[in-house]
Image (spheres, rainbow, N blue to C red):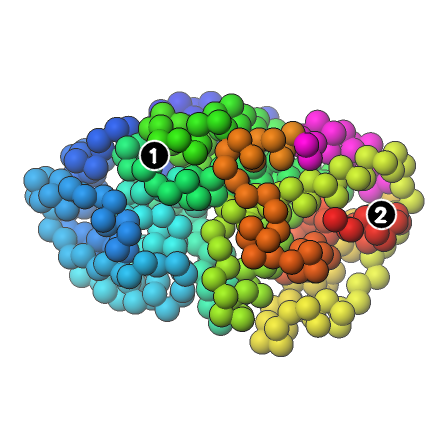
Amino acid sequence: MDLRAVIDSFQNCSCGRAHSFDLKVYEADRGLVHRVGDILSKSGFPKKIYVVSDENAIHASNGILHALDQCGFHYQTKIYPDMRYAYMSTAKEIMNAAAGFDGILSIGTGSVNDVCRYAAAHAKKAFAIFATAPSMDGFASDSAPLIDNDFKISYPCRQPSVVIADTDILAAAPVELKAAGFGDILGKYVGIVDWKVANYTTGEYYCEKIVALVKKAVADVVAIADKVTVHDPEAAKAIMDSLILTGCAMQLAKCTRPASGAEHVVSHFWEIHKLEKGIWPDFHGKKVGIATLLVTKIYKKLLHYPSIEPHKESLDLEDVLSHYSAKNREEIIGYNVPNPTDAIDPAVLKDRWPDILTSIREDLPDETALLDIMHRAGCVTELQDANLTPEFALEALRYSPYMRRRITLLRILDMLGIDENILTI
Ligand SMILES: [Zn+2]
Ligand SMILES: [Zn+2]
């Protein structure tokens, strides 16, 4: 993908911001595992590197170390057992171990990349990723969601300068992972509505051109939904391209708005509560897919309210806190005091309501269409498939918006003056 062309297309953007990103090289093609050393060398990546992976990923990337040897890289490897969780402690461990090296190469997906991204940014090392599964859109992200004290927080980091993917390896990834990547992309439908809502109601920064980029990335993968479950390098590349583009969109916007809305926060709510109980929280994109379905259902119900009489929110903070662990109390208070909805004038909300309805109508597919897309792509759509109960789903829809300091439509439902049963799923 010609990243230069993407950046160039954003020059003199009408939103008034200068857009850029750090990712210099993104290559995805068949057989690239044997060209990793070559691509890294040509992109000027340092030769003395710390290579981090886990057992699954390094096994899938057979030949990668030989490719580094051939191009004169000096490296030390650290192979973790299957890394299902991205802990802050692991990120710090890598940061210390990489002290004598000039760069970090992360081989894998999800957690491996997240801990390495943090380590590279905070130890000020060059950073590259060899992606082994198109499972989530964090590859080109400039932040790392890490678990610390059972709470997941996104830490600002830096984008990798190089991302390489061998599409034969991506295609051979388990269907569950590819479907998860697809589910993560579907979340953008909700994210766009929420970004517009924040812009309409509080004047938060918004860029139409970035939204157009994200919409195209989503449309491109939806178009190949039927091919997600089959071993098809072209389809795997299409998913990867979209995951990279939505990651870059966050960099262009300098915020996560283009790639995540209420559905990601719902997913994070499930995640922290499961982590606390020591339960595997499941793949990110799998949860995001299901959350997208739930949030879409609720947002579409709002179309039944052509006009509203909004009011200021009266927040029962103790009620909110009772749905979070006591050890996260200070963080939750920090997100809600002062109340972010104070920035919303009910008169403005009333005035912009027709625009919000237009976005719900035009930017979100209806539930039936979404279900069809997800089924074709092999995504799970039932709560029990992600080990969730209806009660837990409802709790997340009601209380998750308070674990971020951000305006989403889900966050301001209480202000709308409409039927309280809107959340019933
Ligand atoms: Zn712009
Ligand atoms: Zn995501």
Main SS of residues in magenta: helix
Question: Does the Cβ of the disc 2 residue fall within 8 Å of ligand 2?
Answer: no
Mark 1 falls on what kind of element? helix
Out of 422 and 345, give the one closest to the viewer.
422
In magenta, the rendered stretch is 348-368
316 or 127: nearer the eye?
316
Residue at x-position 34% and y-position 41%: 173
Who's the residue at 18% across and 34% down the image? 35
Picture coordinates of residue 160 (x, y %)? 34, 44
Q: Which mark is residue 416?
A: 2
Q: Secondary structure at mark 2?
A: loop
The residue positioned 23% from the left and 50% from the top of the image is: 58
Disc 1 CB within 8 Å of nearest ligand 2 atom: no
Q: Residue at (18%, 61%) from the top-left corner?
A: 100
Tag 2: Cα neighbours inside 10 Å, few (<14), some, or many (≥20)?
many
Quadrant where the N terminus is found in the figure: top left
Camera-side residue of 279 and 7: 279
Disc 1 marks which amino acid?
Ala
The answer to whether residue 330 of the structure is visible from this angle is no
The kind of residue tagged 2 is: Leu
Mark number, residue 295: none
Asked if residue 64 is among those painted magenta in the image, a careful observer would answer: no
On the image, numbered disc 1 is attached to which residue? 171
Image depth: mark 2 or mark 1 in front: 1
Residue 117 position, x and y percent, is 36, 53
Does the stretch in magenta take in 363?
yes
Q: Is residue 344 above or below residue 92?
A: above
Q: Earlier in the sequence, mark 2 or mark 1?
A: 1
Q: Quadrant of residue 119?
A: bottom left
Number of numbered discs overlaid on the protein picture: 2
* Whether residue 346 can be seen here: yes
